[in-house]
Image: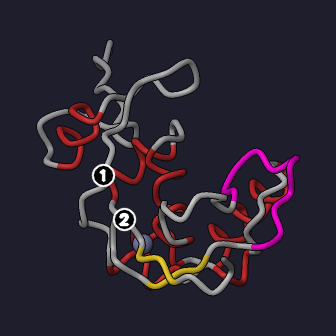
Amino acid sequence: MSDVIIHCERCGARCKVAELRDPEAKMLRWSKEPKGLCINCAVHDFLRNTYPINMLLAEFGPKGLLLPHIQKQFMGIMRAGFADAKPDEIDWNRIVENWDLPFPKKIKPNSTNPCSQQELDEIASGQRPGLGTSGLMENSK
Ligand SMILES: [Zn+2]
């Protein structure tokens, strides 16, 4: 089983089914089925479903992910979530390169993420303001 090569459902990267999984892992879990996403696509999938990171990424694009202090923050999130994946397995350059590839599943708003796919697409195309632009206040004198 461990030697079966599976291709990532999104980018086609070659992966294998992991032998060891942490049952406590709350995020970035290794798949026990021979299907799923590679680690880089899984990280992107996590980010695009996490509010307000998803709005900021829609507005400013993925380039910020290449900054060391942003990656360090993400490692903190991974530790807190008992992620199965290890931070040094993530290839941030690959994530940014593959940014515009479509995902097999659309984002659905839920209790922790109020943003729909459509809203994020509108922010990305500039039709809707994101978080980074605050309203212009009237100058009352
Ligand atoms: Zn992938």
Residue visible at 63% across and 73% down in the picture: 17
* Between 86 and 53, the one nearer to me in the picture: 86
Amino acid bearing label 1: Pro
What crowding class fits label 2: few (fewer than 14 Cα within 10 Å), some (14-19), or many (20 or more)?
A: some
Label 2 vs 1, first from the N-terminus: 2
Above or below, 133 against 12 in this view is above
Q: How is the image coloured?
A: secondary structure
Above or below, 13 against 41 in this view is below
Relative to 20, is 38 on the left or the right?
A: left
* Residue under numbered circle 2: 9
Which label belongs to residue 104? 1
Relative to 31, is 133 on the left or the right?
A: left
Check whether the beta carbons of the residues at disc 2 and disc 1 lie within 8 A of each other: yes
Confirm or reject: label 2 Cβ below 8 Å from ligand 1: yes
Q: Which residues are magenta?
A: 19-29
* Between 8 and 73, the one nearer to me in the picture: 8
Amino acid bearing label 2: Glu
Relative to 126, is 69 on the left or the right?
A: right
Q: Tell which quarter ligand 1 is in.
A: bottom left
Which label belongs to residue 6? none
Residue visible at 72% across and 62% down in the picture: 73
- Tell me residue 80's x, y (percent): 84, 50
Residue visible at 54% across and 51% down in the picture: 46
